[in-house]
Image (spheres, rainbow, N blue to C red):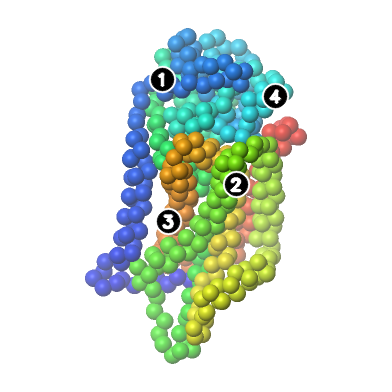
């Protein structure tokens, strides 16, 4: 495994580690501060048009002394469908001076789709689509679905929460807002760049993919252990002493390996972005219905991955990677004997799997972001927005990998000592995560009713 690092001359950090830390801080500052994050006293107003073509403003509700609940959702979002069932129970209570407004955030959903969805399920509150430039999402800092926002009679936001929320909690918060007992909270008006960065963070920590991170950590340590063992064996053959890498070297190694895994994540979203932006550029009419079936596909894959992991069944990917290795050798012929190195193929494939799982929850937000950038009409905005989103995904995986590389030896040895059990537990987590995605799909589509 990665040996405990030795101090460099002067006991100071290598310039590479300082530069990397500085880059992280600079990018965080630019993304969160530069695009003018403005704290607002009252809920931002956005002019919208409902699915029946009636224009209105969000402030119309408070102007009429009403409390409104904004439900940020999209049609292929299974958690949104589950939450909607509780919203119906709440709405059917016919609470005086209370309304619900569902705001669809997915550009591929249509007014007709939303009308049909509402009619089929008996959802008789107002539905609308966000503006083409995602003004409502940016105004209220929405980068995951579902998200509930409550605005009281005076036009102040008193509640904001993402994910599945119990009916009891919703009833409590609505009652507080109606009675004027809820404390106003500030919402951040996000610039497009900040929206892109935070959307990337949300995609990385998506509930569809985050359960896979412990497995990546364990696999990462194993890759490092195998590489160091090969280096030590080669050093013994050459009759030299194999010393552990310096701190600076470890930081560079972690950055390199994290970048490999991060590129796997980036590749998934890059392909989605190219397809969507390309389709918009040529005027192709896309349908979001296919995304409904993305979760069960990913869920099934996770269950299979979990089964293979628990029972230590390996899949030979050599036939996939061999052509690329041969191409690399033709372009860059190797001189001298092959040096011991890291198994980067597995890390890259792990990144692809992580990105695919993440996309099953976060693709609609990413697509809305891409469309917003395209509709600015400025190619530079498209490139920058796209790059910032992808960079935030890569950055998080790189930071995780660097932290793992320079972590204390006892942490690594402890994990490696229990590698088999950690691997099995990770496999079980895979299967639970996959089963959860399948359950969300079946529950949302009405196949099960628990």
Dot 3 crowding, Cα within 10 Å, few <14, some 14–19, many 20+: some
Q: Position of residue 251 (x, y in %)?
A: 39, 65
- The tag earlier along the polypeptide, 3 or 1, is 1
- Can residue 74 be seen by looking at this rendering? yes
Residue labelled with disc 2: 275
Residue 389 shows in the view = no
Q: Which residue is mark 4?
A: 116
Q: Quadrant of residue 73?
A: top right
Q: Earlier in the sequence, mark 3 or mark 2?
A: 2
**Residue 280, percent from left and from top:** 58, 40
Q: Is residue 94 above or below residue 375?
A: above
Residue assigned mark 3: 399
Image label count: 4
Residue that label 1 marks: 156
Which dot, 3 or 4, sits closer to the camera?
4
Badge 4: residue crowd in 10 Å (few <14, some 14–19, many ≥20): few
- Left or right, residue 299 beside residue 183: right
């Amino acid at each position: 495994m990665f040996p405990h690092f030795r101090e460099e001359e002067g006991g100071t950090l290598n310039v590479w580690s300082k530069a990397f830390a500085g880059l992280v801080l600079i990018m965080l500052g630019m993304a969160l501060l530069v695009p003018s994050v403005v704290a607002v006293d009252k809920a931002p107003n956005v002019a919208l048009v409902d699915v029946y073509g009636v224009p209105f403003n969000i402030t119309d509700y408070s102007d009429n002394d009403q409390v409104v609940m904004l439900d940020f959702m999209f049609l292929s979002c299974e958690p949104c469908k589950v939450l909607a069932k509780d919203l119906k129970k709440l709405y059917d209570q016919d609470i005086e001076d209370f309304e619900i407004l569902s705001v669809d955030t997915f550009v591929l959903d249509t007014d007709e789709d939303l009308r049909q969805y509402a009619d089929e399920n008996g959802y008789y509150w107002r539905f609308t689509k966000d503006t083409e430039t995602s003004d409502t999402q940016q105004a209220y800092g929405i980068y995951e679905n579902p998200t509930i926002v409550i605005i009281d009679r005076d036009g102040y936001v008193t509640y904001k929460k993402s994910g599945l929320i119990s009916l009891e909690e919703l009833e409590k918060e609505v009652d507080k807002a109606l009675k004027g007992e809820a404390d106003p909270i500030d919402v951040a008006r996000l610039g497009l760049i900040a929206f892109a960065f935070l959307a990337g963070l949300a995609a990385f920590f998506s509930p569809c993919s985050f359960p896979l991170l412990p497995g990546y950590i364990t696999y990462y340590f194993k890759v490092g252990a195998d590489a160091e063992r090969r280096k030590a064996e080669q050093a013994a053959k050459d009759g030299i002493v194999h010393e552990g890498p310096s701190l600076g070297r470890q930081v560079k190694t972690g950055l390199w390996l994290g970048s490999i895994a991060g590129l796997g994540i980036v590749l998934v979203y890059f392909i989605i972005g190219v397809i969507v932006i390309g389709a918009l550029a040529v005027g192709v009419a896309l349908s979001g219905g296919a995304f409904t079936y993305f979760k069960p596909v990913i869920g099934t894959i996770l269950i299979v991955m979990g089964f293979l992991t628990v029972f230590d069944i390996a899949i030979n990917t050599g036939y996939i990677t061999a052509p690329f290795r041969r191409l690399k050798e033709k372009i860059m012929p190797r001189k001298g004997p092959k040096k011991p190195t890291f198994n980067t193929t597995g890390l890259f494939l792990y990144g692809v799997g992580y990105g695919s799982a993440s996309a099953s929850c976060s693709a609609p937000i990413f697509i809305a972001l891409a469309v917003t950038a395209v509709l600015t009409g400025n190619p530079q905005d498209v490139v920058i927005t796209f790059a910032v989103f992808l960079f935030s995904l890569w950055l998080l995986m790189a930071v995780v990998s660097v932290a793992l590389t320079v972590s204390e030896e006892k942490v690594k040895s402890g994990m490696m000592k229990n590698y088999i059990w950690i691997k099995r537990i990770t496999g079980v987590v895979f299967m639970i995560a996959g089963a959860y995605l399948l359950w969300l799909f079946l529950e949302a589509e009405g196949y099960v009713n628990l």
